[in-house]
Amino acid sequence: MMATTVLARLLEATPLPPKDADIDAVLAAFEDSHARRAAILAEVTETLDVSTPEARELIHHLQTRQDLWREALAGALDRVRDQCVGASKLRHYVPAVNPVNL
C-alpha cells in the first residue's frame, strides 16, 4: 500500500472539529474519527515511505487537523472542569437548597 493512499484516507477520516458544538457532539465526532482512523491503520502491514513531497504535504495537513482536535478536546475538558467547579461551589455555598425545602 502506498503511503500517499494511506495518508489521504487518514486525512479524509479526520474532519475538522465541529465549531460551537456542545461537549457531547465534540466527543462523538472525535470517537467516530478515531475509530475510522484506527481501522485504516490496522490495514497497514508494512513500513510506509513518507519521504515524498506528496506524503509530507499530507502529513502536514494531518498534523494541522490533529492540532485543531487537540484544541477542541482541551476546550471541552475546560468546559467540563468549569461545570464541575460551578456545581461544587453551588453545593458548598448553598447547602440549604434542598428539594425537600422547595
Image (cartoon, rainbow, N blue to C red):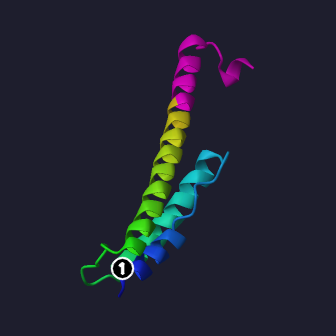
Q: Position of residue 43 (x, y in %)?
A: 35, 83
Q: Nearer the viewer, residue 75 or 65?
A: 65
Residue 60 position (above or below residue 101):
below
Quarter holding residue 99: top right
Q: Nearer the viewer, residue 99 or 20?
A: 20
Q: Which structural element holds mark 1?
A: helix
Residue 1 in magenta?
no
Quarter holding residue 91: top right
| Image point (30%, 72%), residue name | 51
Using a 10 Å C-alpha cutoff, classify the residue at mark 1 as few (fewer than 14 neighbours), some (14 to 19) or many (20 or more).
many
Horizontal side of residue 82 vs 60, given as left or right:
right
Residue 68 position (above or below residue 42):
above
Residue located beneath label 1 in the image = 3
| Image point (61%, 13%), residue name | 94
Residue 101 in magenta?
yes
| Image point (57%, 11%), residue name | 93
Residue 6 position (above or below residue 91):
below
Horizontal side of residue 83 vs 59, given as left or right:
right
Give the residue at the far bottom of this rendering.
Answer: 1
Part of the protein shown in magenta: 82-102
Q: Position of residue 69 (x, y in %)?
A: 50, 52
Residue 55 position (above or below residue 21):
below
Q: What amino acid is at disc 1?
A: Ala
Give the residue at the far front of this rendering.
Answer: 53
The overriding secondary structure of the stretch rendered in magenta is: helix
Give the residue at the far left of this rendering.
Answer: 47
Horizontal side of residue 51 vs 66, given as left or right:
left
Quarter holding residue 76: top right
Q: Nearer the viewer, residue 72 or 82?
A: 72
Task: Name the quadrant of the N terminus.
Answer: bottom left
